[in-house]
Amino acid sequence: KNEVEQSPQNLTAQEGEFITINCSYSVGISALHWLQQHPGGGIVSLFMLSSGKKKHGRLIATINIQEKHSSLHITASHPRDSAVYICAVRSNTGNQFYFGTGTSLTVIP
Amino acid sequence: EAQVTQNPRYLITVTGKKLTVTCSQNMNHEYMSWYRQDPGLGLRQIYYSMNVEVTDKGDVPEGYKVSRKEKRNFPLILESPSPNQTSLYFCASSLSRSNYGYTFGSGTRLTVV
C-alpha cells in the first residue's frame, strides 16, 4: 500500500518548458514536503506546505487538502533543474513520514 | 553553518559485524529521523525521535536500533547487519511538531557482504 503516489515517474523536457509533477496521498497530514535529490544523492528540502501555494524563484508548489493532492511546477526549466523530485507527507496521527518514489526529471538544453 | 552531519559517508562491512552510523545536528532541532533509500522503493522511515529519550518506530525498524541521549545526536545501530540492509541511509532533523522545513544529512552508503 502506497500512502503517497507521484506522477510521472520519469519526465524529459526541453529547456524553457513548463513542468508539472503531481503528488496524491491517502493519509491525513499535518504537512507536505517537496524534496530535490541531485545525482550524487544529497537531498534538499524545497517546500513545506500545509495549505495554499508557495513560490520560490521559478518553483511553485500548491496543495489541495480536500482533494489530497499537491503539484510542483517549474517555470522556464533549465538543465540544472535535472534531479529527482520527491513528495513526502507528515502524518497527522503520529510523526511518521511517508514518501513517494520520486519523479526523475531531465531537462535537455 | 546549520547542518546535519552523518558519518561515515561510505561503509562496507561483513554480515553480523555490529556497526553504528552517527548523525549530529547543530540547529537545536527536537525531531530527528533515519531513512533508508532503495531503488524502486524510495525513502522509507526507520526510526524517529521527538526529543531526548523519546524514540518511535517508522515503517521499517526491523534490524535497527537507535538512541537519543542528547538532543544533537541520533545514532543508528545495526547490531547484526545482513545483506538486505545494504542501502543508502539518510538522517534528517526538524523543529518539533511545527510545520517547519526539514534538513537532511549527506547520506551514508552501506554495503553488507
Image: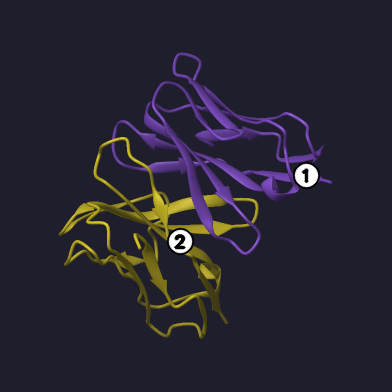
Chain colours: A purple, B yellow
Identify the residue under disc 1.
A107
The answer to which of B47 and A46 lies nearer the viewer is A46
Q: Which residue lies furthest to the front in this view?
A: A57
Above/below status of A36 relative to B73: above
For the residues carrying marks 2 and 1, which lies nearer the camera in this image? 1
Q: Can residue A37 be seen in this view?
A: yes
Q: Which chain is mark 1 on?
A: A
Left/right of residue B58 with respect to residue B71 in the rendered view: right
Identify the residue at the far top of this view: A66
Discs 2 and 1 share one subunit: no
Q: Residue sitting at 22 percent across and 51 percent down?
A: B30
Query: Alpha-carbon distance for marks 2 and 1?
Result: 26 Å
Whether residue A101 is visible, yes or no, is no
Q: Quadrant of the image for the C terminus of chain B? A: bottom right
Q: Of the numbered discs in the image, which one, if any, rests on residue B62?
A: none
At which x and y percent is residue A97? Answer: 40, 43
Q: Is B106 on the left-hand or right-hand side of B19?
A: right
Mark 2 residue type: Phe
Callout 2 touching callout 1 (CB < 8 Å): no
Residue matched to label 2: B90
Q: How crowded is mark 1: few (under 14 residues within 10 Å), some or many (20 or more)?
A: some
Element type where label 1 sits in the image: strand
Front residue of B6/A91: it is B6
Whole-percent x and y of residue A28?
38, 26
Kindly identify the amino acid type of the residue bearing the numbered disc 1.
Val
For image coordinates 56% across by 40% down, the residue present is A100
Q: Which chain does the numbered disc 2 sit on?
A: B
Q: In which quarter of the image is residue B98?
A: top left
**Picture coordinates of residue B19 (x, y %)?**
38, 80
Q: Is residue A49 above or below residue A45?
A: above
Badge 2 element: strand
How dense is the environment of label 2, judged by Cα within 10 Å: few (below 14), some, or many (20 and up)?
many
